[in-house]
Amino acid sequence: MAKTGLKANDGAVALEDPMTKLDNSAIPLTADKTTPVEPSPYDYDLFVIGSGPAGQRAAIQAAKAGRRVAVAERMASVGGICLHHGTIPSKTFREAALHLSGYRERGVYGAAYTVKTDITMSDLLFRADWVIRNEIDVIRHQLRRNSVELWEADAMFVDAHTIRLTTGDGQAQREVTTDKVIIACGTKSTNGDFPFAAPVRW
Ligand SMILES: Cc1cc2nc3c(=O)[nH]c(=O)nc-3n(C[C@H](O)[C@H](O)[C@H](O)COP(=O)(O)OP(=O)(O)OC[C@H]3O[C@@H](n4cnc5c(N)ncnc54)[C@H](O)[C@@H]3O)c2cc1C
């Protein structure tokens, strides 16, 4: 028995689980585009909020199954935190440092071998920028090839089937309707009460 100090039926009112109100029914994905999909009255069968790795994969998977899919991304470019701030830049910096320092080839060419002396931050940024631009092209091409529409806008719920899209400058708005929504908007770091020397950029 759980040691909560509470007895069953001691006057406590059971709270309704808010999650039960959500439509959690699975998106019926078919194996390929040859299986007919029930026509829906909405603009899209699936609307994905966020173009990070989670949103990309969800959108492509649903599109491959014959669904009408759109993705909204509020950053200036696709790829999410993964591509612009996290995994890709950090691993590219590391790879650039290893390459330019000649670290991996020293066993062959000797301990003094380097590709470039005086490696600067702009050397690392140059390579990261190239990789990021390349990845953006790959993602955009993949979405286009699978007929996934891309909205460069901030997405907000109006109701369970209506999404309001607002451009970054706030100048234009539009509402679209969708049967299902996947919220793939990532996470945000917290700085809590920690003192930071500079403002945290998120
Ligand atoms: C510095 C750093 C290093 C990391 N290194 C690694 C690593 O080496 N390996 C690893 O596996 N993971 C790493 N991660 C974690 C990895 O980046 C995340 O797990 C991954 O990005 C999560 O993907 P996601 O698609 O869920 O969300 P995200 O990549 O965060 O993408 C979410 C997207 O949704 C968009 N969005 C949010 N709200 C809205 C809205 N209302 N309308 C429209 N768009 C919206 C955001 O602009 C964003 O582009 C790292 C993270 C950081 C910060």
Image (cartoon, rainbow, N blue to C red):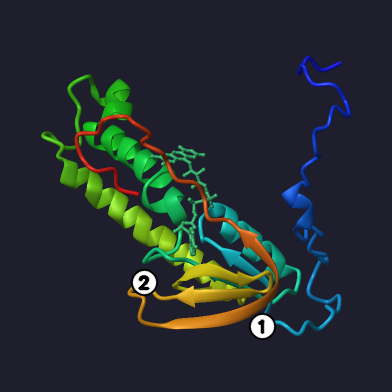
**Residue 146 in the image: x percent, y percent?**
62, 73
Identify the residue under disc 2: 168
Q: In this view, does 110 lie to the left or right of 157?
A: left
In the image, what residue type sits under mark 1?
Asp
Residue name at image x 36 percent, y 71 percent? 168
Closer to us: 18 or 190: 18
On the rendered image, what quadrant is the N terminus found in?
Answer: top right
N-term-proximal mark, 2 vs 1: 1
Q: Where, by quadrant of the figure, is residue 74 drawn?
A: bottom left
Q: Where, by quadrant of the figure, is residue 114 drawn?
A: top left
Residue name at image x 32 percent, y 74 percent? 169
Closer to us: 49 or 93: 49
Residue name at image x 30 percent, y 49 percent? 128
Q: Is residue 156 above or below residue 88?
A: below
How many angstroms separate mark 2 from mark 1 (CA)?
22 Å
In the image, what residue type sits under mark 2?
Gly
Q: In this view, does 68 lie above or below 130?
A: below
Q: Where, by quadrant of the figure, is residue 22 drawn?
A: bottom right
